[in-house]
Structures are given as structure tokens and as C-alpha cells.
Image (cartoon, rainbow, N blue to C red):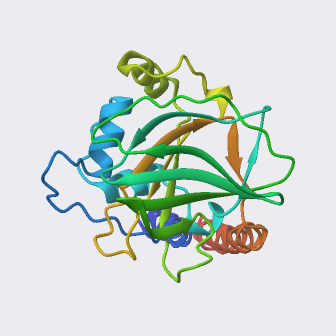
Amino acid sequence: MKKLSSVFLCVSIIFGVTGLANGTTIEDPWRGGGEDNLYEIFNTLFGTSYSTSNALFSARGLADVDDDRWYETNGGIQLTVRYAAYGQELGYEDSDGYTQLASGIASGYTDVSIGPFNTDSDFVWVEKWKKSGTEFGEWYSDDRNSSNDHFVAFAIKDQKLLNAYEVYGGDDLSVTDNVWLIAFEDLDLGDRDYNDLVAVITEAAPIPDGATVVLLGSAMLGVAVFCRKKVFKRS
């Protein structure tokens, strides 16, 4: 029994260490006006059955420290779905400056497919919130202008989800296409719903934070060594 308890303790510690990386909190208030919560958008697109956005993020969300900078993986990136309540603009910023990809208002789920774009360097995602032609906010995936996180990303690595997305009306995709759902919070975290601009993108991948990877790896290695000693000492 003591040996089994040690195993459970070690597993709990490991999951505790990995869980520290995903600290984003997403609220699901009743929005009204046909504006879905983030988990509802994800469920609609990929046929899942999450009951809260935090459950979705815990299961599939990318840690905040690892979603800052991105790179293209196969000659381009394709925006296929967008959702927004106000005028929204999605673009990216690389070593050559800012490039707009899509702009407008989508009161529901809207197909705004565009051709792929190419960048020779890593980049950050940029979202701009506009109303009546006036810009109210500009947010980046690397949190440069805020101490708060305005960007979340979810890896779509399950072919079953991609098949559901195709049935919904999305592109014919496979897990090799590097598919992600990215989402922005367009206020200064006033409501934390992260449903203000949502896009499914392909042929892109995040660049993990090197220090975080090393730190997390070292911590898990240390825990593994500790657990091995604890477990086998009682054998």
C-alpha cells in the first residue's frame, strides 16, 4: 500500500509541475446577442463536448509562455474561420513589420478563407479591435503591451476533430497540416471570454520558450529520480 501511495504521490507531483504552465483563466459569462463562449465555438467547429472553456484549455490549451512567437511550417498559413462581435482585424508582425490578413465584422461563424502568406522570420499574431472605424485596442500573442495574457492557442492533433471540422464546412485537413485554433480577448481582460476573434489556422507552429522547456524538463527529471528512489526503496 505504501508503494502504491508513493506512485500516486509522484504522479500527482508530475502533473502539478506540468499544470503550472497552463495558468490562463477563461470566463464563461452569459453574453447574449448570439455570442458564444469559447468552448461552444470549439464544440461547434470540432464536434467536441466541453462544458467550460477552462476544461477545454486544460485539455488542449498551449501554455502561455509557449504561444508568444510562431513560424510557418510549409510555405504558408491559411485562415479559414473567424468569429467576432465587433469589427476585428487579424494580422501578424515579423521582422518586416505588420501585415494585415483579414478585417471586418462577423456576427456568427464566417468563412473568410484567404490565400497562404509567407514570412522569412518568426512572427507574433496581432489582433485589433475597431468600432465605427476607431481602433480601441491592439493585442499581441507575446503580451508586449499588457501584463495580462490576451491570446490562447489550441492544437488540433486529432484526425477525428479535423473530420468533424470538414463536415462543418472547413477545409479537408490532416494532422500533418499543423492545425491550430487561436483566440483573442479584445478588452484589457474586462470579461476574460477570449471569444472576440477566433481563427483556425494551418501550416504554422509555435516556438516553445527554451527556458521553460529546460526548467520543466529538469523539474520532471528530478521528480522522476525522486519517485524511482521512493518506489523501489519500498520494493
**Residue situated in front as seen by the camera: 4 or 112:** 112
Residue 176 at x, y percent in the picture: 68, 27
Q: Is residue 43 above or below residue 9?
A: above
Indicate the quadrant where residue 224 lies: bottom right
Residue 21 at x, y percent in the picture: 55, 69
**Residue situated in front as seen by the camera: 141 or 106:** 106
Residue 162 at x, y percent in the picture: 48, 25
User: Furthest-front residue in view?
Assistant: 133
Residue 78 at x, y percent in the picture: 62, 33
Q: Is residue 120 left or right of residue 209?
A: right
The residue at the point 50 percent across, 52 percent down is 89
User: Furthest-right residue in view?
Assistant: 120
Q: Is residue 233 above or below residue 207?
A: below
The residue at the point 60 percent across, 22 percent down is 174
Quadrant housing the N terminus: bottom left
The residue at the point 78 percent across, 32 percent down is 74
For residue 6, say whether it is visible.
no
User: Furthest-bottom residue in view?
Assistant: 147
Q: Is residue 95 left or right of residue 186?
A: right
**Residue situated in front as seen by the camera: 80 or 138:** 138
Q: Is residue 111 left or right of residue 193?
A: right
For residue 227, say whether it is visible.
yes
Indicate the quadrant where residue 203 lies: top right
